[in-house]
Image (cartoon, rainbow, N blue to C red):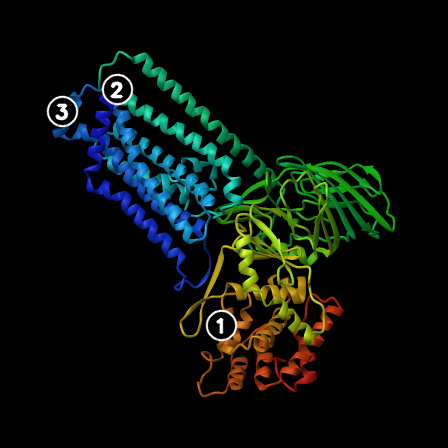
């Protein structure tokens, strides 16, 4: 009863202050406004950004929750200093309550008060989540998880504020508490954790909701649960430890007969706190040890002295066919038997191949005979055992994947195989790659020091050099449905999942909750969440007509085995700032990305889908050749401009675009298409005709070959020479396809151009 009276007294002291009374309400209103603004069309934003409910929620917590911690810091300090520093409250020291009950009443009062913030947050989370189309199970799962984390942050903040107030009796405690608040949040994150890559210190961050994170509501959320639970366990006992110090210090002001019991209690709490840190520290010790092992086998990718990229992709030999059997042996590990059919290499030298560095190779056989092998990180070498017309290389190995890393101050997970979550990209070498291909590269520039798998578009360089092969992959003991970049897939009666591809650059495996694969009315397969699949069917519904349009005048079959993988969390798996990537036979696009561009009249429009459609079309027409213009090309190369001329014809002829409409391609990788929209604002006179504007643009500015080609086609199209343009483009297309060209020079373009038109272009 006396404890309840003390608790009632503490609550009264706390809530009679208008600042503390209104703070939870202000917190709730701020969150409502923040989340509501995210649902509105980003009419004032130009450029690329990621959007979504999960990201908006985390961004609010990174700032709003941190500010609420400041309120709790102030309340906890005042609760301790109230009786000691206010003469009018001296009478409270005469109450018949023990020091233990007084401190616990103060702590419980502050805990209940902090719960108001958590309750307000949870209610608004569920309410606003419904406007983003989230179902109730999603909102309850994530809402409760965030609420628990929020409450634990409040608990450790209250404990820290109380112990500082007890230990520092002077008014300087307010300045020290303010410094502790700033140091434990923004300063620790920006100047310690990210700057020096000390990510294991995250558990000491008071907020735990960081400003600069990979916003992953599926893969990242589930994979990080173990770390989060270990961290929360330590934070809970650390809060108890701080509270014990507060009780011990406060007890010295009163005579007590429980001295031994008091120190015994403090010793137990201290021991439990130390013990609670072991799971978290063990997890991070293993993680950092594995990261160091991967880092030891890297090659340098960027020459800081010359500021140039270094060649990190060696030569490859041909592999006719891969036959791979991957069996799940435990929840998070697997066994692989890979068979490679290799044609005669014509060189009697030791054979090497690359495999993920942490995989344990059990045996290697060459043409049915087991052989010795030498493993140096990723590179495995076998001696020359003689060759036949067609050779069979068999490799058996085991492994597991949970490849933590960090890029640009953000944590990543380059590949993982954890329960039902899986991302095993081809570029990490989960099956033998023919040649010496270092899986990881090292970037060490200024304050940036990290390893990466596909930094600086390295996967495109790999695609350029890697020969095509046939693939057959069999997965056994997999309960979940696995998706892939393979051309076709099936599932046998006994549950074996089989993926096959012909003339493919690689094969990637992935699984994620809620994904479906569907073709619908599209001429290619789409892997996406169900709700996004329906949107894509609508937005890309005319792709079949586009295919018919091109075939009507090109008369050729196109890349039909491609896939669109429209999934979240691509930045989480290490795709950096690139919001779309070509892996194997698929285009990967992050479903949380939106791009906006300002057009001529000042209106800001969303050009995400037109950018995506154009990427699909270019990959459709030219396959892997469409990747080359993203990678380093020769100075006289015109392949990028050439590809965009086919797209210009599509949008002019099929969609009936006006020249100003090409402004929609500003901010995309199809910037040469956007150049044709510049004829008005870059012309010297508004009275000039459109053809004169094109002439002035080509002659007055030093344009690249790619720009010149697009403008030449646009000018002739404006003249009405549509059929001549189509004839030239058809001849060039046949030349590229017939001769398997992966580049096209400006001189070659001018040869075709001058056959039809008397002049044009740069000589």
Mark 3: give few (<14), some (14-19) or many (20+) Cα within 10 Å.
Answer: few
Specify the quadrant of the image occupied by residue 381: top right
Residue 478: image location, x then y, percent:
66, 40
**Residue at the extreme left:** 88
Picture residue at 55% right of the left edge, 63% below the top: 538
Mark 2: give few (<14), some (14-19) or many (20+) Cα within 10 Å.
Answer: some
Query: Residue 663 shows which numbered tag?
Result: 1
User: Mark 1 to mark 3: distance in Å?
Assistant: 75 Å
Q: Secondary structure at mark 2?
A: helix
Q: Secondary structure at mark 3?
A: helix
Q: Is residue 211 placed above or below 587 in the rendered structure?
A: above
Residue 420: image location, x then y, percent:
59, 41
Residue bearing mark 2: 251
Residue 284: image location, x then y, percent:
51, 34
Residue bearing mark 3: 91
The answer to which of marks 2 and 3 sits earlier in the sequence is: 3
Near-viewer residue (29 or 229): 29
């Amino acid at each position: 009863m006396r404890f309840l009276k003390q608790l009632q007294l503490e609550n009264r002291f706390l809530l009679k202050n208008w600042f503390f009374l209104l703070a939870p309400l202000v917190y709730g209103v701020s969150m409502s406004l923040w989340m509501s603004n995210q649902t509105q069309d980003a009419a004032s934003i130009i450029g690329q950004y990621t959007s979504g409910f999960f990201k908006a929620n985390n961004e609010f917590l990174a700032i709003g929750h941190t500010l609420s911690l400041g309120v709790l810091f102030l309340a906890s300090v005042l609760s301790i200093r109230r009786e000691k520093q206010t003469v009018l409250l001296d009478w409270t020291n005469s109450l018949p309550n023990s020091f233990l009950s007084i401190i616990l009443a103060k702590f419980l009062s502050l805990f209940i008060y902090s719960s108001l913030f958590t309750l307000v947050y949870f209610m608004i989370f569920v309410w606003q989540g419904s406007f983003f189309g989230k179902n109730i199970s999603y909102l309850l799962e994530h809402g409760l998880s965030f609420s628990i984390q929020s409450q634990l942050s409040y608990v450790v903040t209250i404990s820290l504020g109380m112990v500082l107030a007890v230990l520092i009796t002077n008014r300087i405690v307010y300045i020290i508490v303010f410094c502790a608040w700033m140091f434990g949040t923004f300063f620790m994150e920006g100047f310690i954790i990210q700057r020096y890559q000390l990510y294991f210190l995250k558990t000491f961050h008071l907020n735990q909701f960081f400003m600069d994170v990979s916003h992953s509501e599926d893969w990242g959320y589930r994979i990080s649960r173990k770390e989060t639970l270990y961290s929360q366990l330590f934070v809970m006992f650390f809060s108890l430890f701080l509270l014990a110090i507060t009780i011990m210090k406060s007890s010295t002001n009163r005579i007590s007969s429980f001295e031994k019991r008091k120190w015994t209690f403090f010793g137990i709490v201290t021991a439990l706190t130390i013990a609670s840190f072991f799971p978290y520290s063990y997890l991070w010790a293993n993680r950092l040890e594995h990261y160091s092992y991967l880092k030891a086998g890297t090659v340098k990718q960027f020459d800081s002295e010359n500021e140039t990229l270094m060649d990190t992709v060696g030569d490859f030999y041909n592999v006719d066919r891969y036959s791979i059997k991957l069996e799940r042996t435990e929840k998070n590990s697997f066994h692989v038997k890979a068979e490679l059919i290799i044609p005669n290499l014509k060189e009697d030298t030791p054979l090497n191949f690359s495999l993920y560095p942490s995989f344990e190779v059990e045996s290697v056989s060459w043409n049915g005979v087991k052989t010795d092998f030498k493993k140096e990180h990723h590179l495995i070498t076998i001696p020359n055992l003689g060759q036949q017309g067609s050779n069979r290389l068999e490799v058996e190995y085991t492994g597991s994947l949970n490849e933590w890393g960090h890029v640009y101050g953000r944590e990543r997970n380059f590949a993982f195989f954890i329960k039902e979550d899986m991302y095993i990209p081809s570029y990490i070498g989960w099956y033998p790659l023919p040649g010496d291909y270092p899986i990881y590269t090292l970037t060490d520039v200024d304050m940036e020091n990290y390893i990466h798998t596909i930094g600086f578009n390295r996967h495109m360089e790999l695609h350029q050099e890697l020969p095509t092969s046939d693939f057959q992959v069999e997965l056994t003991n997999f309960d979940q449905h696995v998706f892939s970049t393979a051309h076709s897939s099936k599932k046998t009666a006994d549950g074996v999942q089989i993926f096959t591809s012909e003339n493919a650059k690689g094969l990637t495996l992935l699984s994620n909750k809620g994904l479906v694969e569907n073709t619908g009315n599209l001429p290619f397969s789409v892997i996406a969440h169900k709700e996004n699949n329906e949107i894509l069917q609508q937005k890309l519904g005319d792709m079949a007509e586009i295919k018919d349009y091109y075939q009507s005048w090109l008369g050729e079959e196109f890349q039909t085995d491609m896939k669109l993988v429209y999934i979240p969390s691509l930045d989480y798996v290490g795709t950096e700032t690139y919001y779309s990537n070509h892996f194997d036979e698929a285009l990967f696009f992050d479903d949380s990305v939106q791009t906006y561009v300002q057009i001529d009249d000042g209106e800001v429009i969303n050009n995400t889908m037109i950018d995506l459609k154009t990427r699909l079309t270019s990959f459709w027409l030219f396959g892997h050749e469409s990747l080359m213009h993203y990678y380093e090309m020769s100075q006289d190369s015109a392949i990028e401009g050439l590809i965009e001329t086919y797209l210009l014809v599509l949008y002019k002829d099929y969609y009936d675009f006006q020249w100003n409409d090409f402004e929609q391609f500003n901010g995309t990788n199809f910037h040469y298409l956007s150049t044709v929209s510049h004829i008005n604002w870059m012309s010297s006179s508004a009275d000039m005709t459109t053809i004169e504007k094109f002439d002035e643009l080509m002659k007055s500015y030093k344009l690249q070959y790619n720009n010149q080609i697009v403008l030449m086609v646009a000018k002739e199209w404006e003249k009405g020479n549509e059929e001549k343009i189509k004839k030239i483009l058809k001849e060039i297309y046949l030349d590229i396809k017939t001769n398997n060209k992966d580049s096209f020079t400006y001189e070659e373009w001018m040869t075709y151009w001058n056959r039809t038109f008397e002049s044009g272009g740069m000589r």
